[in-house]
Image (cartoon, coloured by chain):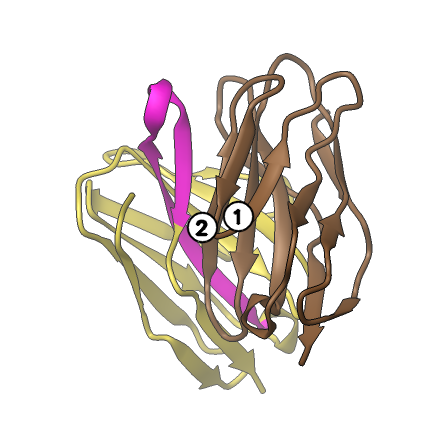
Amino acid sequence: SAVISQKPSRDICQRGTSLTIQCQVDSQVTMMFWYRQQPGQSLTLIATANQGSEATYESGFVIDKFPISRPNLTFSTLTVSNMSPEDSSIYLCSVETSGTSGTYEQYFGPGTRLTVT
Amino acid sequence: GNSVTQMEGPVTLSEEAFLTINCTYTATGYPSLFWYVQYPGEGLQLLLKATKADDKGSNKGFEATYRKETTSFHLEKGSVQVSDSAVYFCALNGGATNKLIFGTGTLLAVQP
């Protein structure tokens, strides 16, 4: 398993501004992911944060809106740029670790609850 | 493509009742299957997993069996408690990318 922390835990922001969310894990991991969970909905993968290269974005998400950094194997940031009320969501980072029998498991941070007014 | 379908909630039960939350999947190959739980105001916690057909994952009194013939991974618990009230997500990963694909989540409310 892995212990993951996120900062901030919540924020209220004005439209048009940007917020950077930090994700820290207690061990080195290859794969880190960023998800969005809109109110009352399931999780949607935004991107895979790759160490040493650009993030890989899912359909519907672009780097200009959600720039991601991954400077090392224990840390990543997600920026939500030029925010609008539609960006109000919980943003979660996760990491993939090797579980039993060589399988992979994802562990999630506590999330950042963002409200855009 | 791969997908997960969960029963819609909310599911409301009395304490000590039997719980079943249905989950079926569509996938190519042989995915791993997971149940995650999200308690109010918190992130997701891995509850249990199964990696091959007929595997049974279990944790905290919950269990789910990987049924390839019915492409299902239903979550069960024999006697729920108020503290089990949460949203439960079924998920799968498979293929080269190991991306997790989630169901829509099922809200469980257990009343004393």
Tell me if label 2 and label 1 are in contact, CB under 8 Å: yes
Quadrant (top left, top right, bottom left, bottom right) of the N terminus of chain A: top left
Q: On screen, A54 above or below B7?
A: above
Estimate the spatial distance between the alpha carbons at disc 2 and disc 1, rounded to whole Å: 6 Å
Residues shaded magenta: A88-107
Q: Residue at x 68, y 15 (%)?
A: B28
Q: Amino acid at mark 2?
A: Trp
Given residues B16 and A59, the one toward you in this image is B16
User: Residue tagged by mark 2?
Assistant: A34
The percent coordinates of residue B76 (x first, y second) are 67, 46
- Dominant SS in magenta: strand
Is B45 placed left or right of B21 in the picture?
left
Chain to which the residue tagged by mark 1 belongs? A
Residue A67 visible in image = no
Circles 2 and 1 on the same subunit: yes
The quarter holding residue A19 reads bottom left
**Mark 1 neighbour class, 10 Å CA radius: few under 14, some 14 to 19, many 20 or more:** many
Q: Amino acid at mark 1?
A: Ile
The chain identifier of the residue carrying mark 2 reads A
Residue drawn at the location 80% of the way across and 62% of the way down: B9
**Colour assignment, chain B:** brown
Q: Which residue is mark 1?
A: A46
Q: Is residue A12 left or right of residue A116?
A: left
Name the residue rendered at 70%, 22% in the picture: B27
Quarter residue A21 falls in: bottom left
Q: Secondary structure at mark 1?
A: strand
Instruction: Pick whichever, A16 or A19, lies toward us.
Output: A19
